[in-house]
């Protein structure tokens, strides 16, 4: 017996009084006679038995009711009473015409009321009983009366033992009524009431159209409505059943590989028990080559359709496939029994409507078999690559750039070099190295005897600056720019930098020739970084050159950087190398570091790892000595980086953290970020402090710290997942130019994880990331333009972005370009180009590219057959776990044409996919983007429910 009973009747040309009585009955049914519940369990009375006999004679289909089943099992007063009343309710013509029946039901238990009566309809629509009675009585067309009934135990377990739950369900089914009863949404009228019977709670549902001649109902539509209601009511029960179906689907997948191996082994050895599949697929392939028009099942001639059906049924004869299909059918039968009295026998696989896509799958395989490009189809052998694939994001380590090498690291050494100024009065720089200035520096950096105090440092620098001290002016600019002890104020910082620049130029013009280099160097730095003036590489190069020519080691270092990058001067690695070496030989650790890199990479000189190692050590030692003198935060950050990476010293994260902590306390945002990252990645690290340091750096506009915080919030690490916070930090980082944050913004907006889906904005962020050289974003853009699922297909744009990603050796871009140029579907076929891309991809260890190259060389259709190369690529792919490559290696001597192997493999793999999609469809889960036609139908359905076409609402994906 079905768990849900759904019956449909209709009234037409009924007397108005009968219509009014029906409305009043279902809406206000009252209990005149209060029945003693203790009598419910006594045997049925003689009158009841006679009434039931009359009912079954007049209404034979009443035997199928749940209430009749209960009465037969236990013929008590209670079950008899419920069966009689329910049978009458579903046969309204008898209620109006048979006095005995009307007299009997006059005292039945009452309806669950909502106000004066129990009638309800669409949300927001008032229900006035007299008005509804009048409207129905005057209606000239058909009025359908449905009854939906459940067992009491099911109603209680599933929450359908109250009017509120039924009201919510039926209000959500407006579109269902419109569709299956062929009534326009604007004309649909429906009213319902819930009757809370003791054994079988049920709902009366009355439906009609405002247009008298509109609407009709077929048996198929009744079954469809019954099925949809059952799926909604018994959703959780179905979910458990679908879990079992999913398990059999998984078993099918596991068995598929074994079936394939047996087939191929038998086909190639000539002992295949049934050659029907091999022969039939080859025959179908030939027939399709001479068939015009659409090559899909519905458009083929009958004899070709028969051939397709034959192949599908042969596929279903495999013992393991057959067993799994039978198990799938058992669970399908259990679902059907929820809302049907009987089930049909399991159809042959070729006739199964829920798995009809198998037939077109066979046609597709036969078509591929007749082409030269069977090896490069998207779904071959289950080796497809997910469109949403992303490679591992690189670790973002801040570069140690010249911007971190401002003059504070070596002020003391430089001042000592010009100590001969001590005897000169006036505006000489020597007079800037005063006791007051020294004390201000101690407050700024802290020392063994003086605690760090930004406010005292600021006031001391201010006093010195007001007396014309150019060093103090520059330090004030830096404190304001970095927000040391006060809010960041770039305008005021630039004002003090400008005063410092003018002071330096005055000093440079007034001193003797041998005293000029230091001030020339300082002036060059101001121009290089736009401190107190517009940034100007040419002016920076001019001033550095003046000082470098006189042997100033820091000017040589800075000028070398300009030559290295080609800024303000023509790019010249050899010139840069000579300048770095000259500066390094004078003890400049910054120059030693850059010189080591050039030796390491062979830039401007021959590659020399030994020299590189020695110069790295010189750099590290020199930085440590400078830090002991100056306690500068940027110098501390640099030493921490070298300890962390083992550059010029042994790796030591504990000591690195010590230097970074000192630097972070001085406000260095790079150190704050580095310290936070280190503590997050270290088991003994303090995660709360790590997040605190990252947050400090992020609030100071450190883009990598913002990006790191965004990932923590996105993944729910160390605190609750918060996509709003994740989007906030990703956006801030992206706006500062972080390519990976821009990529995340694009991805989240495409996947609707950042709120509502916004393809246009997502594309903007992805393009920003791609234009900054992010190969992951370039690949993603290329695939979006190629697939055309979110945006219109633009092959030229796809190729452009995939090419840019491939130029950066992105292996999946190389792989996709290889497939694209080989298939000839969207671009002209270039086999040589395709093979070149696949080889580059295979060299990066991509097992799919290795496998495809092996198949090319094994088949010898598009490239010369080369068994040795095929074995080489198959071996490389198999070593990475590719079972298909391993299978081919194990059976190389049996294969003459791998095409049949691929066709058979795909058939079983796609058969597994069909089972999976059927389960997902039943669960209401969508794994793939829907096409435009489907989206339009959904919009129409929403309109039928009273929504605007473009309204969005949450999607139920799992239960």
Image: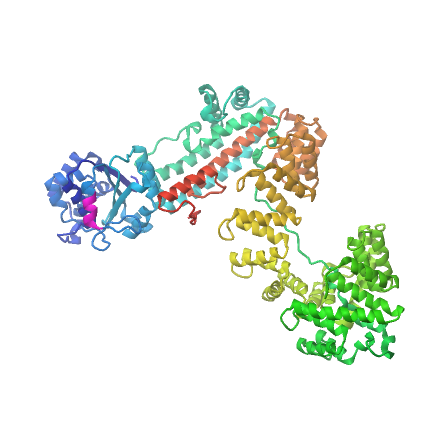
Q: Toward the viewer: 221 or 473?
A: 473
In this picture, is 501 found above or below 779?
Answer: below
Q: Is residue 672 above or below residue 248?
A: below
The residue that appears at 53% across and 61% down in the rendered structure is 719
Residue range in magenta is 128-135
Question: Mainly helix, strand or loop, the magenta region?
Answer: helix
User: Split into 4 quadrants, where in the image is the N terminus?
Assistant: top left
* Residue 399, magenta (yes or no): no
- What residue is shown at x 55% (from left), y 58% (from top)? 728
Whether residue 84 is visible, yes or no, is: no
Give the percent coordinates (x, y) of residue 860. 67, 26
Height in image: 419 above or below 593? below
841 left or right of 41 in image: right
The answer to whether residue 714 is left or right of residue 206 is: right
* Quarter of the rendering containing residue 902: top right
Question: x%, y% of residue 695?
Answer: 59, 64
Tell me if I can see residue 652 in this picture.
yes
- Indicate whether 238 appears above or below 631: above
Residue 665 in which image quadrant: bottom right
Q: How is the image coloured?
A: rainbow
Tell me where residue 19 sits by quadrant.
top left
Position of residue 194 measured from the top left corner of the image (x, y, whole percent)? 25, 49
Of 125 and 718, nearer the camera is 125
Q: Position of residue 494 (x, y in %)?
A: 69, 67
């Amino acid at each position: 017996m079905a768990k849900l009973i759904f019956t449909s009747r209709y009234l037409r040309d009924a007397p108005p009084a009968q219509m009014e009585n029906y409305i009043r009955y279902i809406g206000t049914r009252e209990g005149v006679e209060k029945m003693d519940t203790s009598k419910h369990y006594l045997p049925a009375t003689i009158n009841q038995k006679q009434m039931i006999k009359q009912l079954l004679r007049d209404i034979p289909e009443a035997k199928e009711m749940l209430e009749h089943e209960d009465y037969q099992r236990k013929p008590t007063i209670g079950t008899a009473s419920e069966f009689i009343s329910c049978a009458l309710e579903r046969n309204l013509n008898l209620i109006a015409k048979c006095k005995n029946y009307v007299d009997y039901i006059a005292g039945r238990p009452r309806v669950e009321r909502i106000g004066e009566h129990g009638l309800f309809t669409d949300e927001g629509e008032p229900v006035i009983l007299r008005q509804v009675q009048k409207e129905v009585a005057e209606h000239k067309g058909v009025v359908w009366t449905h009854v939906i009934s459940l067992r009491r135990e099911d109603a209680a377990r599933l929450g359908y033992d109250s009017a509120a739950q039924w009201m919510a369900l039926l209000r959500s089914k407006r579109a269902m009524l419109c569709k299956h009863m062929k009534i326009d949404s604007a004309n649909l009228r429906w009213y319902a009431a819930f009757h809370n019977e003791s054994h079988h709670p049920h709902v009366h549902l009355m439906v009609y159209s405002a247009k008298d001649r509109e609407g009709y109902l077929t048996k198929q539509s009744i079954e469809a409505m019954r099925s949809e209601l059952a799926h909604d009511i018994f959703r959780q029960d179905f979910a458990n059943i679908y879990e079992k179906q999913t398990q059999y689907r998984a078993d099918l997948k596991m068995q598929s590989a074994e079936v394939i191996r047996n087939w191929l082994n038998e086909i190639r050895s000539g002992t295949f028990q049934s050659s029907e599949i091999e022969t039939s697929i080859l025959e179908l392939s030939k027939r399709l080559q001479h068939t015009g028009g659409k090559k899909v099942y519905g458009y083929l001639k009958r004899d070709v359709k028969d051939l397709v059906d034959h192949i599908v049924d042969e596929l279903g004869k495999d013992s393991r496939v057959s067993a799994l299909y039978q198990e799938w059918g058992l669970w399908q039968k259990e679902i059907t029994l929820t809302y049907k009295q009987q089930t049909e026998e399991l159809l042959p696989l070729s006739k199964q409507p829920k798995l009809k896509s198998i037939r077109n799958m066979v046609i597709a395989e036969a078509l591929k078999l007749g082409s030269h490009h069977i090896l490069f189809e998207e779904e071959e052998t289950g080796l497809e690559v997910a469109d949403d694939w992303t490679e591992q994001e690189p670790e973002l380590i801040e570069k140690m750039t010249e911007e971190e090498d401002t003059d504070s690291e070596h002020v003391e050494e430089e001042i000592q070099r010009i100590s001969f100024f001590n005897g000169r009065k006036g505006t000489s720089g020597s007079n800037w190295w005063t006791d007051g200035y020294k004390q201000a520096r101690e407050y700024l950096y802290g020392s063994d005897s003086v605690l760090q105090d930004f406010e005292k440092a600021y006031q001391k620098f201010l006093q010195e600056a007001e007396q014309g001290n150019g060093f103090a002016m520059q330090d004030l600019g830096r404190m304001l720019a970095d927000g040391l002890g006060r809010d960041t104020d770039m305008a005021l910082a630039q004002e003090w930098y400008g005063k410092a620049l003018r002071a330096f130029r005055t000093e440079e013009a007034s001193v003797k020739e041998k005293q000029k280099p230091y001030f020339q160097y300082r002036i060059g730095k101001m121009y290089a970084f736009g401190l107190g003036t517009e940034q100007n590489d040419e002016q920076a190069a001019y001033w550095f050159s003046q000082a470098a020519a006189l042997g100033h080691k820091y000017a040589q270092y800075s000028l070398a950087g300009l030559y290295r990058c080609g800024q303000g001067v023509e790019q010249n690695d050899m010139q840069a190398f000579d300048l770095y070496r000259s500066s390094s030989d004078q003890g400049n650790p910054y120059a030693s570091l850059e010189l080591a890199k050039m030796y390491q990479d062979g830039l401007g000189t021959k590659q020399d790892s030994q020299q590189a190692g020695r110069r790295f050590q010189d750099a590290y030692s020199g930085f440590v000595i400078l830090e002991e003198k100056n306690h500068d935060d940027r110098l501390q950050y640099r030493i921490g980086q070298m300890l962390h990476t083992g550059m010029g010293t042994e790796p030591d994260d504990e000591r690195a953290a010590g230097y970074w902590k000192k630097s972070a306390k001085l406000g260095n945002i790079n150190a704050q970020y580095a310290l936070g990252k280190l503590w997050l990645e270290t088991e003994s690290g303090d995660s709360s402090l790590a997040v605190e340091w990252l947050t400090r750096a992020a609030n100071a506009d450190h883009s990598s710290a913002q990006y790191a915080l965004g990932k923590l919030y996105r993944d729910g690490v160390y605190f609750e997942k918060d996509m709003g916070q994740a989007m906030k930090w990703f956006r801030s980082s992206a706006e500062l130019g972080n390519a990976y944050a821009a990529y995340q913004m694009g991805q989240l907006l495409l996947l609707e994880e950042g709120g509502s889906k916004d393809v246009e904005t997502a594309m903007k962020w992805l393009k920003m990331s791609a234009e900054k050289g992010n190969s992951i974003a370039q690949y993603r853009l290329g695939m979006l333009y190629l697939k055309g699922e979110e945006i219109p297909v633009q092959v030229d744009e796809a190729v452009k972005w995939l090419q840019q990603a491939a130029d950066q050796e992105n292996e999946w871009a190389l792989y996709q370009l290889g497939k694209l140029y080989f298939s000839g579907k969207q671009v002209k076929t270039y086999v040589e180009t395709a093979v070149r891309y696949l080889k580059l991809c295979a060299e990066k260890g991509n097992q799919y590219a290795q496998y495809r190259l092996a198949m090319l060389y094994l088949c010898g259709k598009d490239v010369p057959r080369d068994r040795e190369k095929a074995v080489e690529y198959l071996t490389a792919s198999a070593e990475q776990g590719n079972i298909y490559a391993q299978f081919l290696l194990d059976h190389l001597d049996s294969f003459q044409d791998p095409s049949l192997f691929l066709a058979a493999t795909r058939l079983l793999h796609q058969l597994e996919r069909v089972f999976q999609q059927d389960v997902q469809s039943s669960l209401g889960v969508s794994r793939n983007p829907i096409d435009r036609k489907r989206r339009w139908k959904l919009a129409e359905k929403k309109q039928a429910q009273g929504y605007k076409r473009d309204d969005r609402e949450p999607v139920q994906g799992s239960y």
